[in-house]
Image: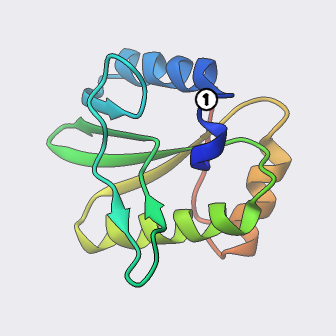
């Protein structure tokens, strides 16, 4: 999710966190009240920050989660997903995308555009 859209979709972010807690994830970090904020990464030469929506641990492995909802800034979202996917592969972590009804087609098209068709979104 792009930073400007986080406040609008706070309910779905909380629903996603509860789903992850129920499936055994621990030490969950998210950019909402009551949780620690995940580490942000700054792009050199610009003020562009990339912060994963949710970061959690399961069985000693770190997982980065992105919430996929229809966005007015798909290019920014693609950049964020590619960066997080690359970062997770470099450090032997995992990158997952969470989506919901009404956003499946948008998510599939985005993944196809950036050649991440091997990712299967978590549907809540």
Which residue corresponds to mark 1? 7
**Residue nearer the viewer, 32 or 14:** 32
Indicate the secondary structure of the residue bearing disc 1: loop
Which residue is depicted at the point 26% across and 30% down? 36
In the image, is residue 52 above or below residue 90?
above
Q: Is residue 26 left or right of residue 83?
A: left
Count of numbered circles in the view:
1
- At which x and y percent is residue 9? 66, 28
- At which x and y percent is residue 110? 74, 62
Question: Which quarter of the figure has residue 84?
Answer: bottom left
Rendering colour mode: rainbow
In the image, is residue 62 above or below residue 83?
above
- At which x and y percent is residue 119? 57, 58
**Residue nearer the viewer, 103 or 77:** 77
Mark 1 residue crowding within 10 angstroms, few (<14) / some (14–19) / many (20+): few
**Residue nearer the viewer, 40 or 86:** 40
Which residue is depicted at the point 38% across and 19% down? 33
Question: Which quarter of the figure has residue 102?
Answer: top right
In the image, is residue 70 above or below residue 40?
above
The quarter of the rendered structure image containing the C terminus is: top right
Question: Which quarter of the figure has residue 117?
Answer: bottom right
Q: Is residue 80 left or right of residue 84?
A: right
Which residue is depicted at the point 28% across and 58% down? 93
Which residue is depicted at the point 41% across and 25% down? 20
């Amino acid at each position: 999710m792009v930073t400007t859209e986080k406040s609008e979709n706070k309910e779905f972010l909380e629903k996603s966190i509860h789903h992850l807690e129920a499936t055994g994830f621990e030490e969950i970090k998210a950019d909402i009240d009551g949780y620690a904020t995940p580490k942000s990464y700054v792009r050199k030469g610009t003020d562009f920050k990339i912060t994963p929506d949710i970061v959690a641990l399961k069985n000693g492995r770190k997982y980065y989660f992105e919430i996929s909802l229809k966005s007015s800034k798909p290019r920014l979202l693609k950049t964020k997903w590619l960066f997080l996917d690359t970062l997770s592969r470099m450090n032997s972590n995992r990158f997952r995308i969470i989506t919901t009804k009404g956003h499946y087609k948008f998510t599939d098209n985005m993944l196809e555009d950036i050649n991440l068709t091997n990712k299967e979104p978590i549907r809540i």
